[in-house]
Image (tube, grey):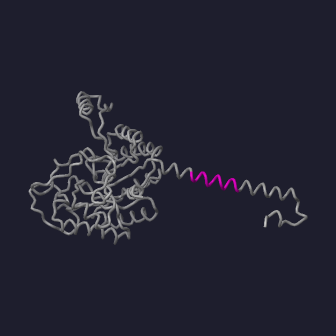
Amino acid sequence: MRIKDSLPEEFDTEVANGIWFLAGKASERVNDSIKKLEDERKVRNSMKKFLITIDTEGDNLWQWKDGDPIGTDNTKYLPRFQKLCDKYGFKPTWLTNYEMMMDDNYVQFIKEVVNEGRGEIGMHLHAWSTPPEYSLKAEKDNAPYLIEYPEHIMEEKICSMTNIIKEKTGITPTSHRAGRWAMNEIYFRLLKKYGYLYDCSATSHIDWRGNGGQTKESHGSDYSKVSEKPYRMQEILEIPVTIRNVHRLFGKNASSIKGKLKSFYHFIKGQNLWLRPNGHNLDEMLYLIDCVEKSSDDYIMFMIHSSELMPGGSPTFKCEEDIEKLYHDLEIIFERISKGFEGTTVSEYGNSILA
């Protein structure tokens, strides 16, 4: 039955027409709202993605020596970075290692972040601090790579780290980054066995073979020839860190003869640009963002260490003034990225690739 037919006879026809008019307008507004939401969804889906990755680990491990205690004071400085990400709607992936999972304050922080949909916890494995303990035949004074260990020890460490994250957070991690960037086929196979889907250890254009481990013939991985785009390894989707080799002069070094020579050398040879702040590379990061935005690439990946967010937590940011300069640069690059990229976690991006 039509509404008009159900109205009492004495009901004014003009009023009835008014009701029909208002009902029609309301329907138009609903349809307009639905169309607007659909258009916004299409725009978001078409936007390039911004992946923030944080190697979430102990304090100033650059200076760590075997047997030294490992602090986790940097936990207190993480909410400020998360708040900045929240401001722009970005969702960081906190790639977390053993000592951080032993810090109750960190566990509370990351559970809140994940449960509120503001970020992701992934796994980051440092072989020297992750149980079980196992002594290598050390011949070098370096931190060991996981790939130096026997396969059964590699598996026990991956199993241990995965279970700790599950038990302490109730979350099953699906994203991973290797400590000191080192991967091999055994490592990929074990990640798959323990439910990981995505890895972001590859650093395109970078050869780490000059960086030794603890054992005699050990060395880092060579990524100098790998793709800049995601690719499959042992059924794991590898999502490389954004690094581009460019031939360009950057003006900040032009004030000294040494700076001019260095800039000219990089212009001829090329230099690898990361979206990885060091307090002196704002121009380079902005240039890299422009390059990715104009390319066919559909994502850009930022990386930093959690301890770099704390004064004195790294060789790079030694004091409060350095940290304030870092956040000055972060505000600029996040504002720039927000205009052309949509924030997403590593696993969300990976899911969109596999869908």
Quarter where residue 120 is shown: bottom left
Q: Position of residue 150 (x, y in %)?
A: 15, 65
Q: Is residue 23 above or below residue 156?
A: above
Is residue 9 toward the left or the right of residue 61 in the image?
Answer: right
Residue in front for this viewpoint, 7 or 342: 7
Q: Is residue 284 above or below residue 310?
A: above
Range of the magenta residues? 27-38
Residue in front for this viewpoint, 7 or 266: 7
Residue placed furthest toward the bottom: 167
Residue in front for this viewpoint, 171 or 232: 232
Q: Position of residue 15 (x, y in %)?
A: 85, 58
Residue at the spot 33% in from the left edge and 46% down from the top edge = 242
- Pick the quarter of the image with the C terminus: bottom left
Is residue 152 toward the left or the right of residue 285 in the image?
Answer: left
Residue at the spot 33% in from the left edge and 61% down from the top edge = 197
Q: Position of residue 249 (x, y in %)?
A: 31, 31
Q: Is residue 328 above or below residue 69?
A: above
- Whether residue 182 is visible to the viewer of this picture, yes or no, is yes
- Whether residue 58 is visible to the viewer of this picture, yes or no, is no
Residue placed furthest toward the front: 1
Whether the magenta-drawn stretch holds residue 82 is answered as no
* Circle count: 0
- Pick the quarter of the image with the N terminus: bottom right
